[in-house]
Image: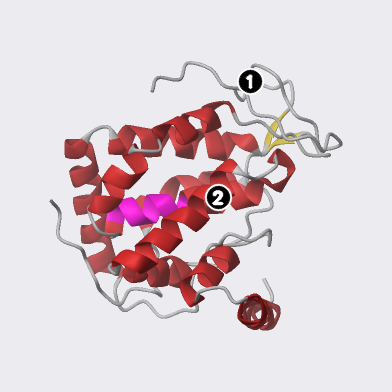
Amino acid sequence: MNLDLYNAKQKLYGLKATVKGYPEIKAKVKAATNLDPWGPTQAQMVEICEACNNYENKRIVMKALWKRVTQTQNKDWPHVYKALAIFEHLLLHGPFSIQDEIKEQLYNLRTLHDFHYVDEKGQDKGLAIREKSKKIVEWVGDAALLQEERNKSAALQSKYVGISGTGDTRDISHVGGGSHGSSGGMGGMVERATHPQYERTFSNITPTVPSTTTNYAAANDVAALAADEDYVRQ
């Protein structure tokens, strides 16, 4: 990825937010969950996570993320994928109250278990979203499991502190990778790339760890994002 282009776009997002009067943290969430074929970066997620230690900032962050999850057309799947990546990071590193707030919105996460979008190349972009939403639902439903995952992530975080770099700007354009008609879990109705209508299938729906604040923006959070690497590289 061209870092000069990336930095220029970040400045542009900031300028647009200023013109529209967005709170600063809302602008950062929108930038971290945009349609660019990369991100969210590790630095972005760390900054958003630290902002959530403030109640008002957390309220703004959660509202913006849920909007991405619930009001996005399937063709704009990166909005949803990136929002889930940030939810995952917040569960592992943010205030423990995040778990309860996400638990209150499990209905919205469970609708993503049937998220489908097949692009013009026949790649199922919904695969990563389905898997990530299931993981988050599992974590918030099992406090012991979430505690274990937080402990693992904290240990890995400590191991990788000090690694230099500009942050995680990996390409997500190849997220998914399973072809339509393959054995990649393509059951049910599929929204093709040429179909602009927003559709989601609703089925099978049934209605403290201290905050860790450290400077690890340059570190790779292996625990939180290891699964993503498989999707990205396919």
Q: Disc 2 residue type?
A: Lys
Between 166 and 73, the one lying in front of the other is 73
Q: Is residue 63 above or below residue 108?
A: below
Q: Residue furthest right?
A: 194
Circle 2: element type: helix
Mark 1 — residue?
Answer: 183
Q: Give x and y (percent) for residue 150.
A: 23, 51
**Could you tell whether 53 is left or right of 163 in the image?**
left
| Mark drawn on residue 67 | 2
Q: Is residue 103 above or below residue 47?
A: above
The image quarter containing residue 197 is top right
Magenta stretch: give its range. 85-92
Task: Check if residue 87 falls in the magenta segment.
Answer: yes
Q: Give x and y (percent) for residue 220.
A: 40, 64
Q: What is the CA distance from the residue labelled 2 to the residue labelled 1?
A: 31 Å
The image quarter containing residue 161 is bottom left
